[in-house]
Amino acid sequence: MKKHNFNAGPSILPREAIEKSAEAILDFNGIGLSILEISHRSKEFDAVNIEAMALFTELLNIPDGYKVIFLGGGASTQFFTVPYNLLQKKAAYLVTGSWAKKASKEAKFFGEVQIVASSEDKNFTYVPKNFVIPTDADYFHITTNNTIFGTELKKDIDSPVTLVADMSSDIFSRPVDIAKYGLIYGGAQKNLAPAGLTFVIVKEEILGKVDRPIPTMVDYRTHIKNDSMFNTPPVFAIFTALQTLKWLKALGGVGEIQKKNIEKANYLYDAIDESKLFVATVPLEEDRSLMNVCFVMKEEYKELEKDFQTFSSERGMIGIKGHRDVGGFRASLYNALPLESVKALVSCMQEFEAKH
Ligand SMILES: *Cc1c(COP(=O)(O)O)cnc(C)c1O
Protein backbone atom coordinates (compact mmCIF):
# COMPACT_ATOMS: atom_id res chain seq x y z
CA MET A 1 0.00 0.00 0.00
CA LYS A 2 1.26 3.47 -0.86
CA LYS A 3 2.16 5.50 2.23
CA HIS A 4 1.27 9.19 2.38
CA ASN A 5 3.70 10.88 4.74
CA PHE A 6 2.12 13.76 6.69
CA ASN A 7 4.66 13.66 9.53
CA ALA A 8 5.28 17.00 11.28
CA GLY A 9 9.04 16.53 11.66
CA PRO A 10 11.29 14.83 10.90
CA SER A 11 9.18 14.63 7.81
CA ILE A 12 8.92 13.85 4.12
CA LEU A 13 11.90 14.67 1.91
CA PRO A 14 12.12 14.58 -1.89
CA ARG A 15 12.56 11.00 -3.07
CA GLU A 16 15.56 12.04 -5.20
CA ALA A 17 17.29 13.52 -2.14
CA ILE A 18 16.82 10.25 -0.27
CA GLU A 19 18.05 8.16 -3.19
CA LYS A 20 21.15 10.33 -3.70
CA SER A 21 21.82 10.13 0.03
CA ALA A 22 21.46 6.36 0.00
CA GLU A 23 23.95 6.14 -2.87
CA ALA A 24 26.41 8.38 -1.04
CA ILE A 25 26.20 6.20 2.05
CA LEU A 26 27.37 3.25 -0.05
CA ASP A 27 29.88 5.05 -2.23
CA PHE A 28 30.33 8.80 -2.10
CA ASN A 29 31.23 10.34 -5.45
CA GLY A 30 32.80 7.08 -6.60
CA ILE A 31 35.68 7.42 -4.12
CA GLY A 32 35.06 3.95 -2.71
CA LEU A 33 34.15 5.25 0.76
CA SER A 34 30.89 6.19 2.41
CA ILE A 35 29.95 9.82 3.11
CA LEU A 36 29.64 8.60 6.70
CA GLU A 37 33.31 7.71 7.02
CA ILE A 38 35.25 10.55 5.46
CA SER A 39 36.75 13.69 6.97
CA HIS A 40 34.62 16.80 7.03
CA ARG A 41 37.81 18.51 5.88
CA SER A 42 38.27 16.28 2.83
CA LYS A 43 38.14 18.11 -0.48
CA GLU A 44 35.10 16.03 -1.45
CA PHE A 45 33.04 17.16 1.53
CA ASP A 46 34.37 20.69 1.40
CA ALA A 47 32.85 20.95 -2.08
CA VAL A 48 29.48 19.76 -0.73
CA ASN A 49 29.54 22.33 2.08
CA ILE A 50 30.47 25.20 -0.23
CA GLU A 51 27.84 24.21 -2.80
CA ALA A 52 25.14 23.82 -0.14
CA MET A 53 25.85 27.31 1.26
CA ALA A 54 25.89 28.78 -2.25
CA LEU A 55 22.63 27.14 -3.31
CA PHE A 56 20.97 28.05 -0.01
CA THR A 57 21.99 31.67 -0.66
CA GLU A 58 20.86 31.56 -4.30
CA LEU A 59 17.46 29.99 -3.73
CA LEU A 60 16.52 32.41 -0.94
CA ASN A 61 18.05 35.33 -2.81
CA ILE A 62 20.09 36.26 0.27
CA PRO A 63 21.68 39.70 -0.21
CA ASP A 64 25.31 40.68 0.39
CA GLY A 65 26.18 41.29 4.00
CA TYR A 66 24.51 38.09 5.17
CA LYS A 67 26.07 34.73 5.85
CA VAL A 68 24.58 31.22 5.94
CA ILE A 69 25.95 28.87 8.59
CA PHE A 70 25.30 25.21 9.33
CA LEU A 71 25.32 24.09 12.96
CA GLY A 72 24.17 21.32 15.26
CA GLY A 73 21.94 21.60 18.31
CA GLY A 74 18.58 22.16 16.68
CA ALA A 75 16.41 25.26 16.69
CA SER A 76 16.16 24.85 20.48
CA THR A 77 19.87 25.71 20.86
CA GLN A 78 19.21 28.89 18.88
CA PHE A 79 16.64 29.89 21.51
CA PHE A 80 19.56 30.83 23.78
CA THR A 81 22.25 31.43 21.13
CA VAL A 82 20.24 34.32 19.69
CA PRO A 83 19.99 36.30 22.97
CA TYR A 84 23.57 35.34 23.86
CA ASN A 85 24.74 37.18 20.74
CA LEU A 86 22.11 39.90 20.42
CA LEU A 87 20.44 40.75 23.73
CA GLN A 88 22.16 43.63 25.48
CA LYS A 89 19.25 44.99 27.56
CA LYS A 90 15.87 44.03 26.25
CA ALA A 91 14.28 41.80 23.62
CA ALA A 92 10.71 41.67 22.33
CA TYR A 93 8.89 38.42 21.50
CA LEU A 94 5.66 37.59 19.71
CA VAL A 95 4.24 34.50 21.41
CA THR A 96 2.29 32.54 18.82
CA GLY A 97 2.84 28.99 20.05
CA SER A 98 4.86 26.61 22.19
CA TRP A 99 8.10 27.13 20.28
CA ALA A 100 7.83 30.93 20.51
CA LYS A 101 7.12 30.62 24.22
CA LYS A 102 10.15 28.40 24.73
CA ALA A 103 12.32 30.86 22.79
CA SER A 104 11.15 33.78 24.97
CA LYS A 105 11.83 31.78 28.13
CA GLU A 106 15.48 31.25 27.18
CA ALA A 107 15.95 34.94 26.39
CA LYS A 108 15.07 35.77 30.01
CA PHE A 109 18.44 34.34 31.05
CA PHE A 110 20.09 37.28 29.28
CA GLY A 111 17.96 40.33 29.96
CA GLU A 112 14.53 41.85 29.95
CA VAL A 113 11.96 40.20 27.72
CA GLN A 114 8.84 42.02 26.60
CA ILE A 115 6.03 39.85 25.27
CA VAL A 116 4.57 42.13 22.63
CA ALA A 117 1.46 39.99 22.12
CA SER A 118 0.36 36.42 22.70
CA SER A 119 -2.40 34.24 21.30
CA GLU A 120 -2.30 31.83 24.21
CA ASP A 121 -5.73 33.06 25.37
CA LYS A 122 -7.26 31.06 22.51
CA ASN A 123 -4.81 28.15 22.53
CA PHE A 124 -2.72 29.81 19.79
CA THR A 125 -5.41 29.46 17.12
CA TYR A 126 -4.72 32.90 15.65
CA VAL A 127 -1.84 35.27 14.98
CA PRO A 128 -2.03 38.51 17.03
CA LYS A 129 -2.43 41.67 14.93
CA ASN A 130 -1.82 45.36 15.60
CA PHE A 131 0.91 44.82 18.14
CA VAL A 132 3.47 47.54 18.79
CA ILE A 133 7.14 46.64 18.56
CA PRO A 134 9.14 48.57 21.18
CA THR A 135 11.79 50.69 19.50
CA ASP A 136 14.16 50.29 22.47
CA ALA A 137 14.39 46.50 22.07
CA ASP A 138 17.61 44.99 20.77
CA TYR A 139 15.56 42.71 18.52
CA PHE A 140 12.05 41.44 17.88
CA HIS A 141 11.58 37.66 17.67
CA ILE A 142 8.84 35.92 15.71
CA THR A 143 8.06 32.32 14.78
CA THR A 144 6.83 32.46 11.20
CA ASN A 145 5.12 29.07 11.18
CA ASN A 146 3.66 27.53 14.29
CA THR A 147 4.13 23.85 13.58
CA ILE A 148 2.03 22.61 16.50
CA PHE A 149 -0.97 24.94 16.21
CA GLY A 150 -1.08 25.42 12.43
CA THR A 151 -0.86 29.20 12.19
CA GLU A 152 1.55 31.11 9.98
CA LEU A 153 2.78 34.64 9.44
CA LYS A 154 2.89 34.43 5.66
CA LYS A 155 4.17 37.95 5.03
CA ASP A 156 7.49 39.47 5.99
CA ILE A 157 6.66 42.15 8.52
CA ASP A 158 8.35 45.51 8.96
CA SER A 159 10.16 45.96 12.24
CA PRO A 160 11.78 49.12 13.60
CA VAL A 161 14.37 46.93 15.36
CA THR A 162 16.37 43.88 14.22
CA LEU A 163 13.89 41.19 13.19
CA VAL A 164 14.75 37.62 14.23
CA ALA A 165 12.70 34.67 12.98
CA ASP A 166 12.44 30.98 13.76
CA MET A 167 11.61 29.56 10.31
CA SER A 168 12.08 25.90 11.21
CA SER A 169 8.92 24.72 9.53
CA ASP A 170 8.41 27.08 6.60
CA ILE A 171 11.90 27.82 5.32
CA PHE A 172 12.03 27.36 1.52
CA SER A 173 8.23 27.15 1.33
CA ARG A 174 7.91 30.68 -0.07
CA PRO A 175 10.11 33.59 -1.17
CA VAL A 176 11.33 35.60 1.84
CA ASP A 177 12.45 39.22 1.79
CA ILE A 178 15.64 38.47 3.70
CA ALA A 179 16.61 42.14 3.88
CA LYS A 180 13.81 42.66 6.42
CA TYR A 181 15.51 40.28 8.84
CA GLY A 182 18.65 40.44 10.93
CA LEU A 183 18.69 36.73 11.66
CA ILE A 184 16.73 33.67 10.59
CA TYR A 185 17.25 30.21 12.05
CA GLY A 186 15.68 26.79 12.10
CA GLY A 187 16.06 23.08 12.50
CA ALA A 188 16.37 21.56 9.03
CA GLN A 189 14.32 18.45 9.76
CA LYS A 190 10.98 19.87 8.63
CA ASN A 191 11.56 20.96 5.07
CA LEU A 192 15.18 20.43 4.12
CA ALA A 193 17.17 17.57 5.59
CA PRO A 194 17.27 14.78 8.13
CA ALA A 195 17.54 15.75 11.81
CA GLY A 196 20.87 17.05 13.06
CA LEU A 197 21.30 20.18 10.95
CA THR A 198 20.46 23.71 12.07
CA PHE A 199 20.70 26.62 9.66
CA VAL A 200 21.31 30.26 10.52
CA ILE A 201 21.15 33.20 8.12
CA VAL A 202 22.67 36.23 9.78
CA LYS A 203 23.38 39.81 8.80
CA GLU A 204 26.98 40.26 9.84
CA GLU A 205 26.64 43.87 10.96
CA ILE A 206 24.26 42.99 13.83
CA LEU A 207 26.95 40.92 15.59
CA GLY A 208 29.55 42.08 18.10
CA LYS A 209 27.28 44.61 19.80
CA VAL A 210 26.79 42.98 23.22
CA ASP A 211 29.16 43.47 26.15
CA ARG A 212 29.14 39.96 27.56
CA PRO A 213 31.87 37.50 26.64
CA ILE A 214 30.52 34.79 24.33
CA PRO A 215 31.88 31.22 24.46
CA THR A 216 33.50 30.31 21.16
CA MET A 217 30.98 27.69 20.04
CA VAL A 218 27.92 29.91 20.56
CA ASP A 219 29.51 32.97 18.96
CA TYR A 220 28.11 33.19 15.42
CA ARG A 221 31.31 34.91 14.28
CA THR A 222 33.26 31.72 14.95
CA HIS A 223 31.17 29.80 12.43
CA ILE A 224 31.08 32.63 9.91
CA LYS A 225 34.86 32.87 9.95
CA ASN A 226 35.25 29.12 9.49
CA ASP A 227 32.53 28.47 6.88
CA SER A 228 30.72 26.26 9.44
CA MET A 229 33.85 24.15 9.83
CA PHE A 230 35.11 25.33 13.23
CA ASN A 231 34.17 21.91 14.55
CA THR A 232 32.66 18.88 12.82
CA PRO A 233 29.41 19.95 11.17
CA PRO A 234 26.52 17.49 10.61
CA VAL A 235 28.14 16.13 7.45
CA PHE A 236 25.47 13.73 6.27
CA ALA A 237 22.56 16.10 6.93
CA ILE A 238 24.35 18.83 4.95
CA PHE A 239 24.78 16.38 2.08
CA THR A 240 21.05 15.61 2.06
CA ALA A 241 20.19 19.31 2.38
CA LEU A 242 22.20 19.94 -0.78
CA GLN A 243 20.22 17.25 -2.62
CA THR A 244 16.94 18.81 -1.45
CA LEU A 245 18.10 22.24 -2.60
CA LYS A 246 19.07 20.85 -6.03
CA TRP A 247 15.61 19.28 -6.29
CA LEU A 248 14.01 22.60 -5.38
CA LYS A 249 16.10 24.49 -7.93
CA ALA A 250 15.20 22.04 -10.71
CA LEU A 251 11.55 22.54 -9.82
CA GLY A 252 11.85 26.29 -10.32
CA GLY A 253 12.74 27.50 -6.83
CA VAL A 254 10.76 28.96 -3.94
CA GLY A 255 8.33 30.92 -6.12
CA GLU A 256 7.22 27.73 -7.85
CA ILE A 257 7.04 25.67 -4.67
CA GLN A 258 4.94 28.39 -3.05
CA LYS A 259 2.32 27.99 -5.79
CA LYS A 260 2.21 24.26 -5.17
CA ASN A 261 2.03 24.76 -1.42
CA ILE A 262 -0.91 27.15 -1.77
CA GLU A 263 -2.69 24.70 -4.07
CA LYS A 264 -2.17 21.79 -1.66
CA ALA A 265 -3.26 23.72 1.43
CA ASN A 266 -6.32 25.20 -0.28
CA TYR A 267 -7.37 21.77 -1.45
CA LEU A 268 -7.33 20.44 2.10
CA TYR A 269 -8.78 23.50 3.88
CA ASP A 270 -11.62 23.66 1.32
CA ALA A 271 -12.46 20.01 1.97
CA ILE A 272 -12.41 20.59 5.74
CA ASP A 273 -14.58 23.72 5.47
CA GLU A 274 -17.12 21.83 3.36
CA SER A 275 -17.16 18.82 5.62
CA LYS A 276 -19.97 17.87 7.99
CA LEU A 277 -17.62 16.07 10.41
CA PHE A 278 -14.39 18.05 10.45
CA VAL A 279 -13.57 21.62 11.39
CA ALA A 280 -10.29 23.52 11.10
CA THR A 281 -8.86 24.71 14.44
CA VAL A 282 -7.69 28.01 12.91
CA PRO A 283 -10.75 29.98 11.81
CA LEU A 284 -9.15 32.93 9.99
CA GLU A 285 -7.92 32.09 6.51
CA GLU A 286 -5.06 34.58 6.61
CA ASP A 287 -3.67 32.93 9.77
CA ARG A 288 -3.87 29.37 8.46
CA SER A 289 -0.57 27.61 7.94
CA LEU A 290 0.22 26.26 4.48
CA MET A 291 2.58 23.76 6.09
CA ASN A 292 0.63 22.27 9.01
CA VAL A 293 -3.13 21.92 8.63
CA CYS A 294 -4.81 21.31 12.00
CA PHE A 295 -8.37 20.05 12.23
CA VAL A 296 -10.63 18.23 14.65
CA MET A 297 -13.99 16.48 14.62
CA LYS A 298 -16.91 18.81 15.39
CA GLU A 299 -18.15 18.57 18.99
CA GLU A 300 -21.09 16.32 18.10
CA TYR A 301 -18.79 13.82 16.33
CA LYS A 302 -15.86 13.90 18.79
CA GLU A 303 -16.15 10.20 19.56
CA LEU A 304 -15.36 9.42 15.90
CA GLU A 305 -11.80 10.79 16.11
CA LYS A 306 -10.29 7.45 17.11
CA ASP A 307 -12.21 5.68 14.35
CA PHE A 308 -10.92 8.10 11.73
CA GLN A 309 -7.39 7.67 13.03
CA THR A 310 -7.67 3.90 12.40
CA PHE A 311 -9.62 4.30 9.15
CA SER A 312 -7.05 6.68 7.68
CA SER A 313 -4.00 4.71 8.78
CA GLU A 314 -5.50 1.59 7.15
CA ARG A 315 -5.51 3.62 3.94
CA GLY A 316 -1.85 4.63 4.16
CA MET A 317 -2.16 8.03 5.85
CA ILE A 318 0.87 8.44 8.12
CA GLY A 319 1.45 11.01 10.84
CA ILE A 320 -1.90 12.79 10.91
CA LYS A 321 -2.46 12.47 14.65
CA GLY A 322 -2.64 16.00 16.07
CA HIS A 323 -0.13 17.26 18.62
CA ARG A 324 -1.23 16.49 22.19
CA ASP A 325 -1.73 20.24 22.84
CA VAL A 326 -4.34 20.48 20.08
CA GLY A 327 -5.79 16.99 19.68
CA GLY A 328 -7.56 15.83 16.55
CA PHE A 329 -5.49 15.82 13.40
CA ARG A 330 -2.57 17.60 11.81
CA ALA A 331 -1.55 17.06 8.21
CA SER A 332 1.86 18.51 7.44
CA LEU A 333 2.14 19.49 3.78
CA TYR A 334 5.84 20.27 3.47
CA ASN A 335 7.49 20.99 0.11
CA ALA A 336 8.18 17.36 -0.73
CA LEU A 337 4.60 16.19 -0.15
CA PRO A 338 2.86 15.74 -3.53
CA LEU A 339 -0.66 17.05 -4.23
CA GLU A 340 -1.57 13.44 -4.88
CA SER A 341 -1.14 12.70 -1.14
CA VAL A 342 -3.44 15.59 -0.19
CA LYS A 343 -6.02 14.27 -2.63
CA ALA A 344 -5.72 10.81 -1.10
CA LEU A 345 -6.31 12.24 2.38
CA VAL A 346 -9.34 14.21 1.21
CA SER A 347 -10.81 11.11 -0.49
CA CYS A 348 -10.26 9.22 2.72
CA MET A 349 -12.08 11.93 4.73
CA GLN A 350 -14.97 11.95 2.26
CA GLU A 351 -15.22 8.18 2.28
CA PHE A 352 -15.33 8.21 6.09
CA GLU A 353 -17.92 10.97 6.11
CA ALA A 354 -20.14 9.04 3.70
CA LYS A 355 -20.19 6.18 6.20
CA HIS A 356 -21.35 8.35 9.11
C1 LIG B 1 10.45 21.72 15.37
C2 LIG B 1 10.54 23.15 15.75
C3 LIG B 1 11.46 23.61 16.70
C4 LIG B 1 12.38 22.69 17.47
O1 LIG B 1 13.39 22.28 16.68
P1 LIG B 1 14.58 21.36 17.24
O2 LIG B 1 15.48 21.30 16.05
O3 LIG B 1 13.98 20.05 17.63
O4 LIG B 1 15.18 22.04 18.41
C5 LIG B 1 11.52 24.96 16.95
N1 LIG B 1 10.71 25.83 16.32
C6 LIG B 1 9.79 25.42 15.40
C7 LIG B 1 8.93 26.42 14.72
C8 LIG B 1 9.69 24.07 15.10
O5 LIG B 1 8.79 23.66 14.18
Image (tube, rainbow, N blue to C red):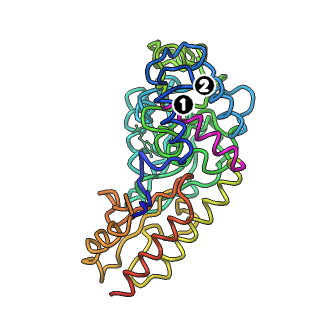
Which residue is found at the position 61% from the left and 55% from the top? 154
* Residue 209 visible, this orientation: no
Which is nearer the eye, 164 or 108? 164
* Residue 171 visible, this orientation: yes
Image x and y of residue 189, in percent? 46, 41
In the displayed structure image, the side of residue 356 where residue 81 appears, left or right: right
Highlighted range, magenta: 237-252
Chief secondary structure of the magenta portion: helix
The answer to whether 340 is drawn above or below residue 159 in the figure is: below
Residue 241 belongs to magenta span:
yes
Image x and y of residue 287, in percent? 54, 62
Q: Residues within 10 Å of mark 2 (few under 14, many from 20)?
A: some
Q: CA distance from mark 1 to mark 2?
A: 6 Å
Which residue is found at the position 47% from the left and 24% from the top? 34
Q: Are marks 1 and 2 in contact (CB under 8 Å)?
A: yes
Q: Extreme right residue here?
A: 64
- Marker disc for residue 328: none
Question: Hey, what amino acid is under mark 1?
Answer: Phe
Q: Which residue is mark 1?
A: 239
Which residue is found at the position 41% from the left and 45% from the top? 10
Residue 142 belongs to magenta span:
no
Which is nearer the eye, 271 or 219? 271
Image x and y of residue 28, in percent? 53, 25
Task: Report helix, strand or loop for mark 2.
Answer: helix
Which residue is found at the position 38% from the left and 33% from the top? 106
Q: Which residue is mark 2?
A: 48
Q: Residues within 10 Å of mark 1 (few under 14, many from 20)?
A: many
First in sequence, mark 1 or 2: give its number.
2
Task: Report helix, strand or loop for mark 1.
Answer: helix
